[in-house]
Image (cartoon, helix red, strand yellow):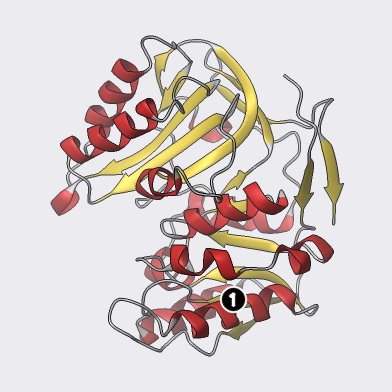
Amino acid sequence: MGHDRELLIPEPLRPGDLVGVVAPCGPVEEGALVRGITFLERLGFRVVQGDNCTRQRGYLAGHDRQRLENLTGMLESPEIRAVLFARGGYGSMRILDGIDCGAIRRDPKILLGMSDATALQLSLFARCGLVSLSGPMVAGQMAKGLDEPSERSLVDALTLPFAGKDLVEAFAATARVIRHGRAEGLFLGGCLSLVTSLLGTAHVPDFSGAVLFLEDVNEPPYRLDRMFTHLKLAGVLDRISGLVLGHFTGPRGIDVSPDAERIARELTDTHPVPILAGFPFGHALPNLTLPCGVPVELDTDGPRLTVTVQAGFRVKLH
């Protein structure tokens, strides 16, 4: 499988680097934000908080213009080496069209988030080739407290190169193989509801040949079925090379992962790709930090999920 495109892979962080915290989505509870920032400072980073992080306009952290200006200001600042989402909710889709990729191409930096951040991460990959990190958010899981595997994964993802890393190694014994096989392709995905919401827009990447990773929260099985079916009808499930499933939690915290796994298997029967489930990422702990946009190899016999740099990729390291 050949890909003739440039991947922008930001440099890992070093102790003392400045990181920015942004709120392009929902309003942030101030106490949680303080706890999350304290956690980052304990890791050895300097932190600057976005102006709109504590603003509230209904279900948004301020007007679209305020949220966009805050995000773009962080992306354009040469001093800031990583941009971290405070929380999810809803709102990043409303500002996608206003983001200028020029600054990102000139100075790619780490972008860390999940949930609603999926829309921004996939958009910037589709338009700029930016590799981002899908992982805990500052006023979310960082504020509540990460378990040891999640914290170790986060620190490694922020501070170490991930080329050659086996993303599933520590949890190989608990991963569930839904369908055996091997696959290679770009590792793309995130929150299922945001992936499906981008379909038909200019902000969705080409999932052809991708190893797709998905998770979601507060979704009952029939809505998971609707979203997976949306991916099927849009042709996505017939173009991917592999599927990796994380945490799926329904209303009232009920684990609906078995439903998600059954639905995913049924809807890929005509295009039987390998499926690895029980992968620890998403809205529950452990939540491993995953590089979104890198080439990977999936082998269910390990199982192994290895980050690779293959012939056919033009990779630009920063």
Q: Is residue 8 left or right of residue 120?
A: right
Residue drawn 54% across the image and 20% down it: 303
Which picture quadrant has residue 237?
top left
Q: Is residue 307 left or right of residue 145?
A: right
Q: Residue furthest left?
A: 252
Query: x, y percentage for residue 130?
Result: 70, 52
Q: Is residue 20 left or right of residue 279?
A: right
Q: In front: 149, or 249?
A: 249
Vertical comparison of 42 with 232: above or below: below
Which picture quadrant has residue 25?
bottom left
Q: Residues within 10 Å of mark 1 (few under 14, many from 20)?
A: many
Residue that label 1 marks = 71
**Total count of labels:** 1
- Quarter of the rendering occupied by the C terminus: bottom right
Callout 1 secondary element: helix
Residue drawn 55% across the image and 20% down it: 241
- Quarter of the rendering occupied by the N terminus: top right
Residue drawn 83% across the image and 65% down it: 106
Q: Amino acid at mark 1?
A: Leu
Question: Residue 85: in sight, yes or no?
Answer: yes
Q: In front: 161, or 103?
A: 103
Question: Residue 45: in sight, yes or no?
Answer: no
Query: x, y percentage for residue 176?
Result: 39, 22
Residue drawn 44% across the image and 11% down it: 272
Query: x, y percentage for residue 213?
Result: 48, 36
Query: x, y percentage for residue 222?
Result: 16, 36
